[in-house]
Image (cartoon, grey):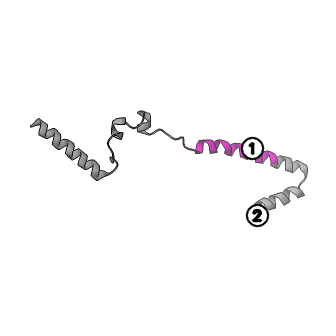
Amino acid sequence: MTPKEQLIQAIQRSPDSIVQELLEILQALHQQLEPEKVTAEPARQKSVLERMGGIPKHLLNIGGLSDRDHRRDLITEHLQKKYRQDS
């Protein structure tokens, strides 16, 4: 028998005054638990990109920047071009 079933049987055997007090106790417990549920859910914070207005459009024009090797090759190519122009 589950605790809920045992409680129902105990309530059925109890006088109305005890049932009324038990009901008030249960209501108070529910009120105490509800604020915890609200505060227990963490508020979703905006990411840095969201706070700055989203991903910059000029970065979207260059594809594959999420791949490390591709990013490294693009940076290497950019630096080589830069230093060839400076020389």
Number of residues whose C-alpha sits closer than 10 Å to that of mark 1, classed few (under 14), some (14–19) or many (20 or more): few
**Residue 64 image offset from top left, x and y in percent:** 33, 48
Mark earlier in primary sequence (1, 2): 2
Q: Residue furthest bottom?
A: 1
Q: How many marks?
A: 2
**Residue 83 image offset from top left, x and y in percent:** 13, 40
Look at the image and say whether residue 29 sits in the magenta stretch.
yes
Name the residue rendered at 24%, 49% in the picture.
73
Quadrant in the picture for the N terminus: bottom right
Look at the image and say whether residue 81 sits in the magenta stretch.
no
Real-space Cα separation, disc 1 to disc 2, in angstroms: 23 Å
Residue linked to disc 2: 2
Q: Which numbered mark, 1 or 2, is in the foreground of this view? A: 2
Point out which mark residue 5 bears: none
Q: Is residue 42 left or right of residue 6?
A: left
Magenta residues, start to end: 23-43
Number of residues whose C-alpha sits closer than 10 Å to that of mark 2, classed few (under 14), some (14–19) or many (20 or more): few
Name the residue rendered at 85%, 60% in the picture.
9
Quadrant in the picture for the C terminus: top left
Name the kind of residue labelled 2 in the image. Thr
Relative vertical location of residue 24 with respect to residue 7 in this rendering, above or below: above
Name the residue rendered at 49%, 39% in the picture.
45
Which secondary structure lies at badge 1?
A: helix
Q: Residue furthest left?
A: 87
* Quarter holding residue 63: top left
**Residue 76 image offset from top left, x and y in percent:** 20, 46
Residue linked to disc 1: 28
Relative vertical location of residue 70 with respect to residue 2 in this rendering, above or below: above
Name the kind of residue labelled 1 in the image. Ala
Considering depth in this image, is 70 or 13 the residue closer to the camera? Answer: 70
Which secondary structure lies at badge 2?
A: loop
Q: Is residue 74 left or right of residue 53?
A: left
